Each structure stands twice: as structure tokens, then as C-alpha cells.
Image (cartoon, grey):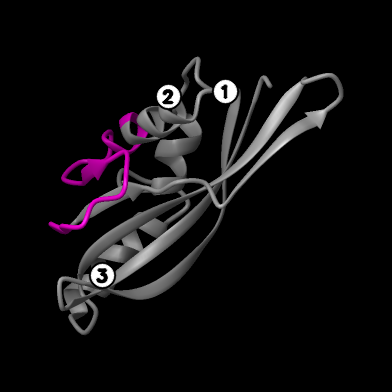
């Protein structure tokens, strides 16, 4: 698997969510609602024998707005829903591409992230990607 292809394909999958700005890489500026595909937390080679498959854990972060705004809580709830038009899980898992075999959203953690002196409510989705080694 080629890491940049995986990150680009994740961005394409997320772009299917209406109104969500997507960057298939980390950026210093945030314009909510915005998703960023970050570099992997882990990249495990040879998950199966003989270079059969690799296993990658990629964080996808979705920023929705100021952490103390009720509208931010309402917005983030739509992205963490397991299904629906704004579901990150559904968008990633339904996307078909040649860069990897499967992508599965494992879980989500809520964070308050400070970017350029502004605190944003965000959700970090851990995505497991498996493909040919």
C-alpha cells in the first residue's frame, strides 16, 4: 500500500459528506466543519505471512466549531452517528478504491483542540486500513 494514496482516498471518501471541508493531510488552519486525514498512528507490516497484507491505523479528525457552542455539539453528533448522510463511519467504510482492501472505523474520541489560539470541539476517528503488503 502507498501511504499517500491511502490518505488521498480517505479524503475522497470524506468529501462525500455534504458541507464538510476535507484535507487529506494535516494543516495548520481550520475552517469548520473540516476533516483532516493525519499520518498513521501505527503501520504494521506483514500482518499475514509473506507480505500478504499490511495493517495501518489512521486518525481522521473532524473539527466542528468552538468547543463551548451548543451548535458544535449538535454538529459533531451527526458526524459520529453510525449511519446517515453526515456519518464519517459510513462514508469511509462504503468507499471503494484500489489503494486498500478495507477500511473500518474502530472508534471515536472527543477532544478540545487549540488551533491558532481558538479552542475547537473535534472528534478523532481511529480508522483501521488493511491492504496488500
Q: Against 8, is 78 above or below?
A: below
Q: Going by the image, does 94 lie left or right of 75?
A: right
Mark 3–mark 2 Cα distance, whole angstroms, equals 32 Å
Q: Mark 2 — residue?
A: 5
Name the quadrant containing residue 72.
Answer: bottom left
* Residue that protrudes farthest toward the right in the picture: 49
The range drawn in magenta is: 12-32
Name the quadrant containing residue 116.
Answer: bottom left
Marks 3, 2: nearer the viewer? 2
Q: Mark 3 — residue?
A: 74
Point 39% across, 74% down: residue: 111
Q: Residue 62 at x, y = what percent?
A: 32, 57
Q: Going by the image, does 14 lie left or right of 3?
A: left
* Magenta-colored stretch includes residue 28: yes
Q: Going by the image, does 120 lie left or right of 44?
A: left
Point 42% across, 71% down: residue: 110
- How many circles with numbers are drawn on the protein? 3
Neighbour class for label 3 at 10 Å: few (<14), some, many (≥20)? few
Q: Mark 1 — residue?
A: 1
Q: Residue 1 at x, y = what percent?
A: 57, 23
* Magenta-colored stretch includes residue 125: no
Assess whether mark 1 and mark 2 are in contact (beta carbons under 8 angstroms). Answer: yes
Neighbour class for label 1 at 10 Å: few (<14), some, many (≥20)? some
Q: Against 22, is 27 above or below?
A: below
> Principal SS element in the magenta part?
loop
Amino acid at each position: 500500500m502507498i501511504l499517500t494514496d491511502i490518505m488521498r482516498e480517505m479524503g475522497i471518501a470524506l468529501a462525500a459528506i455534504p458541507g464538510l471541508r476535507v484535507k487529506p493531510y494535516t494543516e495548520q488552519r481550520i475552517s469548520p466543519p473540516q476533516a483532516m486525514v493525519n499520518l498513521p498512528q501505527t503501520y504494521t507490516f506483514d500482518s499475514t505471512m509473506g507480505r500478504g497484507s499490511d495493517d495501518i491505523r489512521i486518525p481522521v479528525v473532524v473539527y466542528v466549531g468552538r468547543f463551548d457552542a451548543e451548535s458544535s455539539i449538535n454538529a459533531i453528533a451527526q458526524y459520529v452517528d453510525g449511519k446517515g448522510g453526515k456519518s464519517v463511519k459510513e462514508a469511509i467504510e462504503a468507499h471503494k478504491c484500489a489503494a486498500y482492501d478495507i477500511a473500518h472505523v474502530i472508534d471515536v474520541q472527543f477532544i478540545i483542540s487549540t488551533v491558532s489560539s481558538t479552542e475547537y470541539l473535534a472528534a478523532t476517528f481511529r480508522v483501521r486500513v488493511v491492504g496488500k503488503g
